[in-house]
Image (spheres, grey):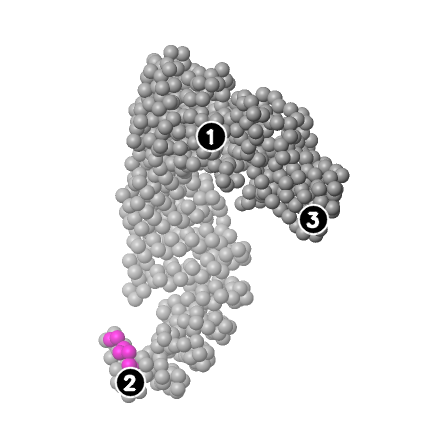
């Protein structure tokens, strides 16, 4: 201990760093002798002991020495009180259950005149209030006392000992404001007691210096966090507005961060500073730009949508690449929410696509297409504007996709050369086809974009007169394309030209108006997930098909695994154009199927984009025989668009088959309506039958459960006579 005592005074006076060996000796003596140094006659020895315990003491040491620290809180020496107060803060953080020991002494410390002791006391009370709600209620009674201390600091004359840039002890002021914020949160009584003080601090504190700005910032946070008056909240917003004009970027940043937190509750007050916030979009610092962008988007309303959107579109043209996606998304959301007209909405989105088409989200393309379809009076205007954009630049993939879709749907309006809303273009059929062919051949076009262009070219075959042969030639080229999606489309489109030319106009007619929530494809290489149609309302049963009772719901997707969305009971089970081929597994179409030579089983059609074949089925075909159970498919009738068949199940065993169920799934180009079986028990010895194509069969025979799956994908070729119908 001698070595430690020898160096203690010099360590304090000359601010030397205590060697590690001294700290170890000190800790050992604190552990063994406990109160030797804490009770020493020298305040410097006591101070070193308190600092060492606070920084390096273990939880066990804190528990042992906590009573000594509490005693020192009542010492007459202000220097020791300050050190003991801060040591108590560290002890509470290490051993929270000791908080109650220091609560009585902490309250008495508020009557101290020494700023260091007051500062430590406020820190200690803040720590106690954060950890114990009961203590929080107890110290709310001290709010008037804290208010008086704060008023004394605000109105006191110049004191060189505590003055920083003209502000009297800003460190203590900040600590008191933080404590008041905790005490006044969700408490009307405490909030009312501090309202006048906060108004006085907000109006009398000079913000030209950093110290004053720090006090004002804490004042604003306190005003916004307590139950303050509306006028006081407006004053706080105005203080943050003045911060926006500060040359210090850090102050501007924290100002916008605070405004963003309160913009929802005090929207009108923040709106007064909209011009200053928009100017911050031009700041050189990216962090400030990001905060200004977020705040600007939050300020957009139906009243200022046009002016704010102009500023945001200008910002989009020069903003950093890392902010383009966020800016574009914010503009889309604001335009959809506050759009004054459909034309303005379309123009705004097209402007974004032209400027930052590569940075928009995937759902932008289907959303814009849906918007265009609903604005029937703007079809001519839109197709002219998109054609201009397509000819000018094909680098923005999202814009090119929408343009190709629009030209394919409304190309006839473009060729007419008549438009009231915009100066029309005089374009020929060759000009339009040249533009689409450029997209198809460009190395910048993604497979999804080429798919849009190829479909648009095909659709134009029913909207133009003189260049059908050229379209046929373009489509045929992609029949051997390395991209399977393009190849499949081209093969099917070629089939329309050759075998089914009489149906081409019907298949390629204009798309109907799309519902807002209707499924669509994303702006990528793969289609988005397609939802099942709503079957909540009962529909008339097709001829020869009965509705399915609730006890026999056939969950086709559950058969395939991976979904928990059941088909609705009491209605015909219907599959949409979802990709059942992919879900089933092992049923992917082969290249031969692309040429329409295969003979898949098809019940009836409803989807237009593809074609398939219908086959006349032999009267009866056996599809399953196992464990005495026999399933036969029986042809009932066939029309141009559907086939009606029956499945007959019979039992040749000596025992009845019970719990009989059957499930079926079909390819993606097919819709299936399926009636319930006539029963779920098949009598033994073939005395009865159950009547109703990978299919799944499950049943119980002599207590043993059986389950099997069989795929019905072939029928005698002599019994099939193909005919075509649009999907």
Q: Looking at the picture, how far across and down is residue 171, in whole percent?
A: 35, 62
Q: Tell me the mark number nearer the camera, choosing from 2 and 1.
A: 1
Q: Looking at the picture, how far across and down is residue 322, in whole percent?
A: 32, 42
Q: What SS does tag 1 mark? A: helix
Mark 2 or mark 1: whose residue is earlier in sequence: 2
Per the model, the C-alpha gap separating discs 1 and 3 is 40 Å
| Quarter occupied by residue 314 | top left
Res. 258 in view = yes
* Region in magenta: 16-22
* Label of residue 701 in the image: 3
Residue visible at 44% across and 44% down?
263
Which part of the image, by quadrant, shows the N terminus?
bottom left
Side of 391 where 136 appears, left or right:
right
Side of 639 where 21 appears, left or right:
left
In-front residue for pair 329/663: 663
Residue visible at 35% across and 24% down?
477
Kindly identify which residue carries mark 1.
593
Circle 3 residues within 10 Å: few <14, some 14–19, many ≥20: some
Say if 173 sits above or below 261 in the image.
below
In-front residue for pair 588/268: 588
| Quarter occupied by residue 154 | bottom left
Say if 13 sits above or below 152 in the image.
below
Assess whether residue 190 is covered by the magenta stretch: no
Mark 2 or mark 3: whose residue is earlier in sequence: 2
Residue visible at 39% across and 29% down?
486
Kindly identify which residue carries mark 2.
5
Q: What SS does tag 2 mark? A: helix
Assess whether residue 20 is covered by the magenta stretch: yes
Res. 403 in view = no
């Amino acid at each position: 201990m001698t070595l430690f005592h020898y160096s203690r005074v010099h360590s304090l006076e000359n601010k030397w760093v205590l060697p590690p060996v001294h700290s170890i000796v000190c800790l050992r003596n604190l552990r063994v002798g406990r109160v030797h140094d804490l009770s020493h006659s020298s305040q410097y020895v006591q101070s070193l002991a308190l600092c060492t315990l606070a920084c390096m003491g273990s939880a066990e040491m804190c528990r042992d020495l906590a009573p000594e620290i509490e005693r020192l809180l009542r010492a007459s020496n202000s220097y020791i009180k300050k050190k003991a107060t801060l040591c108590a803060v560290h002890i509470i953080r290490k051993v929270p259950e000791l908080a109650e020991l220091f609560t009585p002494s902490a309250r008495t410390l508020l009557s101290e005149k020494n700023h260091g002791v007051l500062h430590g006391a406020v820190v200690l009370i803040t720590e106690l209030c954060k950890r114990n709600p009961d203590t929080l209620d107890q110290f709310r009674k001290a709010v008037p006392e804290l208010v008086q201390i704060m008023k004394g600091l605000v109105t006191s004359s110049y004191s060189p000992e505590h003055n920083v840039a003209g502000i009297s002890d800003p460190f203590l002021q900040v600590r008191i404001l933080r404590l008041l914020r905790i005490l006044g949160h969700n408490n009307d009584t405490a909030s009312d007691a501090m309202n006048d003080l906060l108004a006085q601090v907000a109006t009398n504190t000079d913000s030209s210096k950093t110290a004053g700005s720090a006090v004002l910032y804490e004042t604003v946070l306190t005003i916004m966090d307590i139950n303050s008056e509306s006028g006081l909240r407006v004053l706080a917003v105005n203080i943050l507005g003045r911060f926006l004009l500060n040359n210090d970027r850090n102050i501007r940043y924290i100002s916008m961060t605070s405004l963003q937190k309160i913009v929802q509750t005090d929207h009108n007050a923040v709106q007064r500073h909209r011009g200053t916030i928009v100017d911050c979009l031009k700041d050189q610092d990216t962090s400030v730009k990001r905060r200004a962008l977020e705040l600007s988007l939050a300020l957009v309303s139906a009243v200022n949508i046009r002016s704010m959107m102009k500023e945001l579109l200008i910002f989009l043209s020069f903003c950093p690449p890392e902010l383009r996606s966020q800016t574009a998304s914010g503009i889309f959301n604001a335009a959809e929410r506050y759009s004054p007209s459909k034309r303005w909405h379309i123009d705004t989105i097209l402007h974004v696509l032209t400027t930052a088409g590569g940075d928009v989200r995937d759902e932008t393309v289907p959303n814009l297409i849906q918007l265009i379809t609903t604005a029937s009076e703007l079809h001519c205007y839109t197709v002219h504007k998109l054609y201009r954009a397509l000819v000018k630049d094909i680098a923005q993939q999202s814009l090119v996709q929408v343009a190709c879709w629009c030209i394919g749907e409304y190309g006839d309006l473009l060729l007419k050369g008549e438009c009231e809303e915009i100066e029309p273009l005089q374009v020929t059929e060759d000009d339009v086809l040249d533009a689409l062919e450029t997209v198809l051949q460009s190395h910048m076009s993604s497979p999804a974009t080429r798919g849009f262009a190829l479909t648009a070219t095909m659709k134009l075959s029913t909207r133009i007169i003189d260049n059908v042969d050229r379209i046929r030639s373009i489509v045929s080229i992609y029949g051997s394309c390395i991209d399977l999606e393009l190849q499949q489309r081209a093969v099917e489109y070629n089939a329309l030209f050759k075998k089914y030319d009489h149906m081409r106009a019907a298949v390629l007619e204009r798309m109907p108006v799309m519902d807002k929530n209707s499924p669509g494809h994303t702006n990528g290489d793969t289609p988005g997930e397609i939802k099942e149609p709503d079957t909540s309302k009962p529909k008339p049963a097709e001829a020869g098909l009965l509705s399915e009772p609730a006890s026999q719901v056939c969950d086709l997707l559950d058969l395939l695994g991976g979904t928990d969305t059941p088909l609705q009971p009491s209605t015909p089970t219907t599959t949409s154009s979802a990709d059942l081929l992919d879900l089933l597994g092992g049923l992917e179409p082969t290249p031969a199927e692309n040429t329409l030579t295969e003979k898949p089983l098809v019940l009836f059609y409803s989807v237009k984009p593809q074609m398939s074949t219908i086959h006349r089925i032999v009267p009866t075909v056996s599809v399953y025989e196992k464990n005495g159970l026999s399933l036969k498919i029986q042809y009932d009738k066939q029309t141009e668009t559907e086939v009606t068949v029956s499945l007959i199940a019979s039992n040749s065993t000596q025992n009845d088959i019970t719990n009989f169920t059957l499930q079926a799934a079909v390819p993606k180009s097919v819709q299936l309506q399926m009636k319930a079986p006539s029963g779920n028990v098949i009598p033994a010895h073939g005395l009865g039958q159950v009547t109703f194509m990978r299919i799944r069969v499950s049943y119980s025979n002599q207590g043993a459960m059986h389950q099997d799956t069989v795929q019905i994908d072939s029928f005698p070729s002599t019994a099939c006579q193909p005919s075509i119908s649009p999907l």
